[in-house]
Image: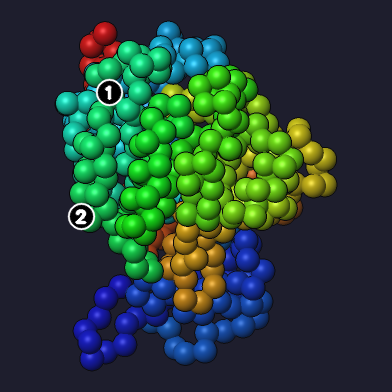
Amino acid sequence: MTSSPHTPSPRLWIRQPLACADPAAANGVVIQDSRIVERLAAGQEPSLPVDRVFDASRHVLLPGLVNTHHHFYQTLTRAYSAALNKELFPWLTTLYDVWANLDEEQIAVASELAMVELLLSGCTTVADHHYVFSDALESAIDRQVETARRLGVRAALTRGSMSVGRDQGGLPPQSVVQDEARILDDSRRLIQRYHQPEEGAMITVALAPCSPFSVSRELMKATAELAKTEGVRLHTHLAETEDETRYCERLFGLRPLDYLEECGWLNERTWLAHGIHFTDEEIRRLGRAGTGIAHCPSSNMVLGSGLCPTLELERAGAPLGLAVDGSASNDHSNLAEEMRQAMLLGRLRYRPDQIGHDDVIRWATQGSARCLGRTDIGGLAPGQQADLALFKLDEPRFSGAENPLAALLLCGAHRADRVMVAGRWRVIDGAIPDLDLSALMARHQEAAQRLWRAL
């Protein structure tokens, strides 16, 4: 949707959706260039003439979903036999030996498949936490940037790291451990080359040691200082299992959150994956600091890690977002399905009247945007980016549903019909234009098999 400097840009009205996550947009939104310029209440018409109209009367309208944590490369090791039915630490040690053989062709196709799967599920901003770097995988983040640009999705990419290998008592093999100078130098390079600090950014870069116990104390502190200097965010796994808590207490003499604070990480520029095993006092500290939590319900269930205290965290003031996590602990990259899992898991921990579909939609949009430090996405207010997900209720699973918005979660929506990113349609009629999905899946399957055979 572009125009010459001398003529107004065309205006598109997404008109009269069947239902909308934002009651103030019951009659739709008006898009101009990459932004929402009007939000129309029930019965309200656009204030200025529109050039085009999209009839949304058969669609449920949501802000584009925002994913806050993933490991794209893990799409190559879904349902991997040797790692089945294991808790986190033995699961990791089994798979690290597989992932150590990743090459750049494999990371490229794995990233593409993960981004495509997310996009088809209504996700407009994808996040990835990549921390496996070997001599054959120097440019993993660069390849992810290329893929995101080609697909036209927003991407929050993190330069992960591991500096403590098995020789130092850590979990990963030495072949995917890097020295600290190399990690920090590459982190600076990626920030300076790709990070867009401005509103409407399509690519952002954050710094993300794999976990506090997979890098040294010195690197944790240096990473926090570099992120502050460069004005980027921080991300890591934290409080995922009780084993992790005991490991940190034995290694550092501190609980995970205390260690994180000592290293300069407990602030509003940080968001953490999982956040399950916090005390009440720690939850209050997270809220005061404004540190975000990426809730990963399916992964937490697959690995038996526990139940995230979502309501307590949100009430304390901690931004709470939603994430699919890696496709070797979740086995899919579908954020729409993850919303349903989050609601059902929340009902298991709390009462049904305490977590509704609207709460989980908020986590997957506004809350996730806050975790990524963004106010320009995650909503339908004028001035925000035109990132939209529209779902049809035309499958048997929806037949008889009285509340269209609740039906997305209760009946199990899994694929968007239309997805818009920055004012451009990226999914049309449930498919990505000009993408040969069958060919992509064939390339991905071949890459996965090549990785398995490398052992």
Identify the element where label 1 is drawn.
Answer: helix
Relative to 28, say whether 420 is above or below: above
Relative to 267, say whether 212 is above or below: above
Amino acid type at image mark 1: Val
Residue 360 seen? no
Q: Nearer the viewer, residue 128 or 6?
A: 128
| Residue 203: image location, x then y, percent | 31, 55
Which of the two discs, 2 and 1, labels the residue nearer the N terminus? Answer: 1
- What residue is disc 1 on? 176
Amino acid type at image mark 2: Arg
Which quadrant of the rendered structure holds the N terminus?
bottom left
| Residue 89: image location, x then y, percent | 50, 16
- The answer to whether residue 444 is left or right of residue 414 is left
| Residue 118 image-quadrant placement | top left
Residue 28 seen? yes
Identify the element where label 2 is drawn.
Answer: helix
Q: Which residue is rendered at x = 41% and y = 60% of the image?
A: 420
Q: Which residue is rendered at x = 26% and y = 8% of the image?
A: 455
| Residue 306 image-quadrant placement | top right
- The answer to whether residue 421 is left or right of residue 349 is left
| Residue 100: image location, x then y, percent | 28, 19
Task: Return the mark for residue 310.
Answer: none
Q: Residues within 10 Å of mark 2 (few under 14, many from 20)?
A: few
Relative to 318, say whether 213 is above or below: above
Task: Return the mark for residue 193.
Answer: 2
Q: How crowded is mark 1: few (under 14 residues within 10 Å), some or many (20 or more)?
A: many
Q: Which residue is rendered at x = 40% and y = 47% of the image?
A: 224
| Residue 168: image location, x then y, percent | 36, 16
Q: Which residue is rendered at x = 64% and y = 39% of the image?
A: 342
Relative to 281, say whether 172 is above or below: above
